[in-house]
Image (cartoon, helix red, strand yellow):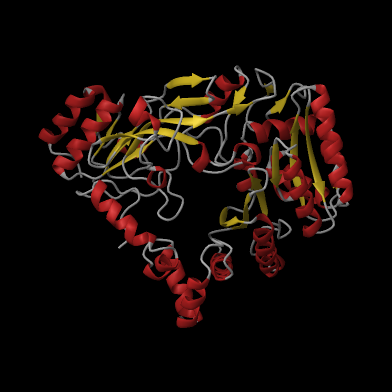
Amino acid sequence: MALHKDIYREFEDVVGPEYICDDPAIMPSYHGTEFAAVILPENTAQVQAIIKLCNKHRIPFRPVCTGWTGKFAPGFLYIDLRRMNRIIEINEKNMYAVVEPYVITAQLQAELMKRGLHLNVKGAGSNCSAMLRGHGHLDQTTSGDDRNHLAIEWVTPAGDIVRSGSLGSSDEWFCGDGPGPSLRSILTSAVPPGVTPGVFTKAAMKVYHWPGPAQFPVTGVSPNYQLSEIPPNMMARYYSFPSVEKMWQAEIKIGEAEIAFELMGFNIAMVAANISTSNEQEEENFKRLSKEIQGPGFFIILAGNSAADFAYKQRVLNQIVNDNSGKSVTSLEDPRTEGILLCQCIRISASIRETFRPGGMFKSIPVMGQRDLTIRWAIGAGKAKEPLIEKGLIVDDGGAAFGWGVEQGHLGKTEIFCKYDPHNEVANQAVEDWHKEQSDRAFRENYFALLIGQAVEDWHKEQSDRAFKERYFALLIGQNAEIGRALSNYDKWWNEIQKSFDPNRVSPEGGALV
């Protein structure tokens, strides 16, 4: 559905003829959908003008920068933010960085390392926008981005410019909550629908001390990245334990001692993926490493500020591991392999291989909460995978889950995958059933939110198991008033917020839950 030529000209006047297109020969390069047009603004003023025109003509829009974009209905205006790619400021004294949406994390991380700083790199990878909200490998010491986003410049779906936190009162970027009223819960929503309507045009992120070299010694080309040398006072290891309880106790003590730069509860299949450059090599490594472990385990990086600090952290780690009967997987201590793991897990190029193991499509179930409880849930979900593995319906990854601690273990995330051939109808249905059953169990047992309490218990008494499952899956598309009631009626509040910020319904992000 192309724009009327007069409307097209109005948008063209905002960005210039070189930065708007509705040519049907070009549109397929943008995900092959029938967009009204693609437009590339250069700055906040242009974004604002574009959104005001969308409201004037009732044209729905969606902004896109570096990540996966989901599905589009015909007639949308595709706002491509690739021209907004500037690092605005790196404030070394107050430890924050201000970026536009098309600055990727690898770009910002490289500039920060030169200054002895680094940031939270989301698990989606360093090729994604540095603005991206989420969690990742470095959460142990940098937390997740619900904590790291500071002041934000936001163009609302109605075309108003909002400068949140300290930016709105003092033109400074250091705080996301004030002085003055805070919009953090709207701008960084962590519950469904989990996205903010409108466009973020600038954002400040908290940055952290980096004890490593100013230039990370990466060599090789994708996917065979490695380090030319192990940086001084830095180490990567994988430890396995005889039981989940032992592993968890070691995680607690490591968090209390605050010695880990990174701690990830990888399963051994994910480690195999991260040190491999082909599917065949990965399967060989998985089989070999599976014989070297005694049970569940975790991957850890130590980074010392000095030789003495590094030696201290090593001694503490060794004591904690020994107290809990942990053992290092010695083949992973080889300097070349260690360098690959350091590179993959600090620069965060690991996720693409650890997620997309051989097997085609994957389904995952993530749970957040108290780390030990989410691990226990994942054990049950892993056991439920075993019959599917035996039948050859899904990839054999040992049935294991993975996860990590956030802020030295004060919070945790656990996730489990099922990987399968989507063209196999039997496998497709089996995985769908597994996903429904285990998601239902997670919610029923309060693993998703340990805050729900009696409200969920009362609801369960009223619903049959079948009705419960049907209503639970309605939540995934944001249409469940029953679960909304159990979560402080968030769906009603979100609807009211949407009506206020987007009266003409031109922004599908965070759409109303009706």
Percent position of residue 368, x then y: 58, 55
Q: Is residue 491 left or right of residue 419?
A: left
Residue at the spot x=83%, y=24% of the render?
A: 308
For residue 29, above or below residue 511: above
Which one is nearer the viewer's eye here, 18 or 377? 377
State the residue in front, 146 or 26: 146
Judge whether residue 35 can be spotted in this image.
Answer: yes
Quadrant location, the N terminus: top left
Quarter of the image that includes the C terminus? bottom left
For residue 187, above or below residue 179: below
Q: Is residue 179 above or below residue 383?
A: above
Q: Residue at x 44, y 63 (%)?
A: 487
Residue 280 in sight here: no
- Taking 78 as reference, is 414 left or right? right
Of residues 498 and 66, the one nearer the viewer is 498
Q: Residue furthest front?
A: 179
Q: Position of residue 387 (x, y in %)?
A: 69, 70
User: Where residue 248 appears, x then y in whole percent?
Assistant: 75, 54
Closest to the observer: 418 or 510?
Answer: 510
- Residue 251 percent coordinates (x, y): 75, 48
